[in-house]
Image (cartoon, rainbow, N blue to C red):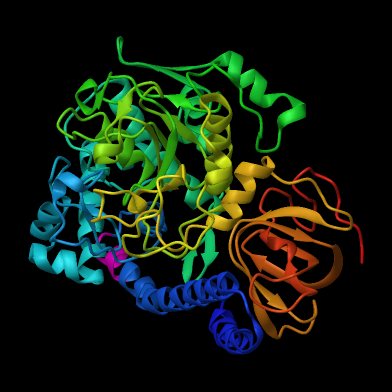
Amino acid sequence: MHLHSLAAALGCSLLLTAAVADASQSTRLDTLRLQLDKTNALVLAQAQRASYPEYFRRAYARYPNLPAGALEAIAYAETNWVHVRPDPAQDPRDLHMPRSYGVMGLYHGGGFADQVGDGARLIGRSARQVIDDPESNILAAAALLDRALAATAPDQRSRALAAPEQLAPVLARYAGYGAGNGGIADYARQSFAYGVLQTLQRGVAEQGIQIKAQPLKLERAFDSDQLRKLRAPALLMNAGDDSVQLNRALADDLAAPAITAAPATDFGTKAVDFGEAIWNPASSSNYSTASNATSAVILHTMEGSYAGSISWFQNPSAQVSAHYLIRKSDGQITQMVREYHQAWHAKNHNYYTIGIEHDGRAADAGNWSAAMVNASARLTKSICARRGVNCASAWSGPGYDTYHLVPDSVRVKGHGMLTGNENRYDPGKYFPWSNYYGLINGGGTPPNPPGKYWVDTFANATGYKWPSTLTPVGTLYQGTNYVYCKAWGEEVRSGSSYNHYWLKTDLDVGPAGAWVSAYYLSRWGNDEARDNNGAVIPDC
């Protein structure tokens, strides 16, 4: 259903040409150029993904015991179906976790398992092929997953799984986080398995990524205690006895009817420094207990996955950490270093900064989910209020894909905007700085202005001139946006999810008063159209 992005890109080019002729403000032109760059990057990514379904099909043909969709879901969780090519010239000491490679995000040693080398041996190809060639990369991952399946069920005559829920222990074995057992180490592997199975349960249909939703029950994949921990930002992790326990007091608060939507409230000290966070301490070898002046917030991308970062910051040899990590799929926040200690994330700036790592990669134009951006904004806003950081000084854009120094007076900014960090540019040019500035200075989800209703779209939505004459005219980017009203129109469907309602809105790229499908409001059901507060959007 997302085959109109090329048309949107061409339309965006025409809009940019017109804007250059009459716009007098350079900031507006910068914004339009960034929008064009992002749209073109998404179109290019979709084109590059065109061959991947066939590569997945061939992998399943060679390893028929693997459950359908498992490889695609791993690739989505690890790389967003991007063929990752880390810069070999970059000093490993400057990275925040081991490098991963290819569509499947396979590790190649450096502190984690050598999935590249092991996978290459299993399929009879070279490590260089597994790194460079997407088909070889997918096939190597299939071989590794098949090996994990055999090891998990060695006594079964047939290794085929009866149900996708049985994949959880196989995924935990496959994860590639190296040696290490115990409650907290196991939690990182379970978190990886949960992310993959959650993707299979929901399905994906966006920008060339196609993963069919499956009616799996996560309650069958994990026991009830595990699932409560994996789902909710309500955990306490104790490194002393290597345990992970549900913080029931916070869980009850989060379940209260008044805050069923994404909470914009700081829950104080109920779970360490920020009430929504999971407490999962980094290895004491990876941060300093020296006092932190806590006068600035620095935003990063992990250049890897949420679960992998949790595992890596627990590894004593990592020599790197951050205060907080945020999961892309749902905005879950893990705290690994207390705010008054110095995490090792920004070199000579560690003594006064709080570091926030975001799931995914800076170069990926499709990385910034609304859930992750909104959770990050709630966290930063809380830090500003509790620690006296000046949120009003935050960088408001544009982002950059190269190192770009900004003044020291900017107290909320990116890793690649600091002196001494010239080899980094995260969180990258696609990070929505302008929107983020509004969130941290305006308070969570903004109240509805007269005649407008705020909504969170889970993916970029193609805008159309009318609900039933599907001629694309632009793009509404994922995240927090406003709409005016709804109208009944042509059905948009993906698997069991569908919606006939269309929402009138002003596009990010394109004309005012266009229409997007209410299918993009993921928190509501079929044929529903509600705003972020649960209010029904009125008819036009």
In the image, is 162 to the left or to the right of 259?
A: left
Residue range highlighted in magenta: 58-63
206 vs 33: above or below: above
Q: In which quarter of the image is residue 466?
A: bottom right
Residue drawn at 67 percent across, 67 percent down: 493
Give coordinates of residue 92: x percent, y percent.
15, 48
Where residue 382 appears, as percent x and y from the top left, is: 57, 31
* Residue 196 in the image, given as x and y percentages of width and height: 42, 47
**Position above or below: 36 against 312:** below
Which residue is pictured at 11% across the width and 60% down the height?
120
Which residue appears farthest toward the top when viewing the image?
Answer: 241
Quadrant in the picture for the N terminus: bottom right
* Magenta run includes residue 140: no
* Location of the C terminus (image quadrant): bottom right
In the image, is residue 8 above or below residue 332? below
The overriding secondary structure of the stretch rendered in magenta is helix
Q: Can residue 157 be seen in this view?
A: no
| Quadrant position of residue 141 | bottom left
Q: Who's the residue at 24% across and 35% down the image? A: 320
Residue 61 inside the magenta-drawn segment: yes
Please provide percent x and percent y for residue 279: 42, 22
